[in-house]
Image (spheres, rainbow, N blue to C red):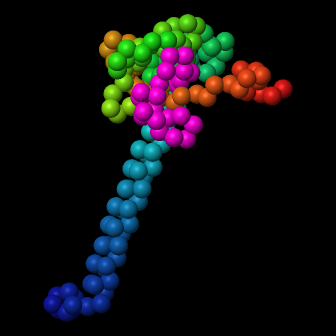
Amino acid sequence: MNTDNFFQSKVFKGIILGITGLVVFIFIFGLGVFVGTERANFSFKWAQAYHTNFGGPQGGFLDDITGRDFTAANGVFGQIIKIDGPTLTIKGKDNVEKIVLLSDRTTVVFQKKNVNLSDLKISDSVVVIGDPNDSGQIRAELIRIMPSPMKGLPANNSPI
């Protein structure tokens, strides 16, 4: 058999097409394995750091069931006790005062509307989410003003 005829034959073209298909298949399979591994790795790390990222107990949820060991580095829930320019002082859990730094990037929300920083008042109940700095202050990204309980209702807004 002549080699020139072999390279022109349907068998040779089929072999090349089969090898190309196999290489593409292996590449796509490997890419899928890589993406799946990265997603699983992210999910595992996210679950392991959940309590750190969202203010849960340092030892995990089953370590300290009484709730005495919660971290609050990235946020605070409490009442505004002082407004001093771009700084809020918030009295949070166990009467701990947290300093919150405001910026032009801070979003303030009341119910479903964005409001201005100037709408914040002393004695407002707020939830603050942000990033801690090296001084133990929170750089606010989001401040949600909580509505006041209606008169005659218990503090948890339950009519019963």
In the rendered view of the protein, which quadrant contains the N terminus?
bottom left
Front-most of 63 and 116? Answer: 116
**Residue 158 lies in the magenta-colored region:** no
Asked whether, in this view, residue 9 is left or right of residue 142, the answer is left
Question: In the rendered image, is residue 59 in sight?
Answer: no
List the single residue furthest toward the right.
160
* Residue in the image at 77% along x and 27% along y: 158
Picture coordinates of residue 101 (x, y %)? 37, 20
Question: In the rendered image, is residue 86 in sight?
Answer: yes
* Residue in the image at 56% along x and 21% along y: 125
Q: Is residue 15 above or below residue 117?
A: below
Asked whether, in this view, residue 39 is left or right of residue 158, the answer is left
- Tell how many labels: 0
Asked whether, in this view, residue 153 is left or right of residue 25, the answer is right
Q: Is residue 41 above or below residue 16?
A: above
* Residue in the image at 26% along x and 91% along y: 9
Front-most of 108 and 139? Answer: 108
Residue 136: quarter of image: top left
Asked whether, in this view, residue 47 is left or right of residue 10, the answer is right
Q: Is residue 7 above or below residue 79?
A: below
In the rendered view of the protein, which quadrant contains the C terminus?
top right
* Residue in the image at 38% along x and 66% along y: 25
Picture coordinates of residue 127 (x, y %)? 53, 25
**Residue 111 lies in the magenta-colored region:** yes
Front-most of 4 and 31? Answer: 31
Picture coordinates of residue 44 (x, y %)? 49, 35
Q: Is residue 44 above or below residue 69?
A: below
The magenta region covers 107-127
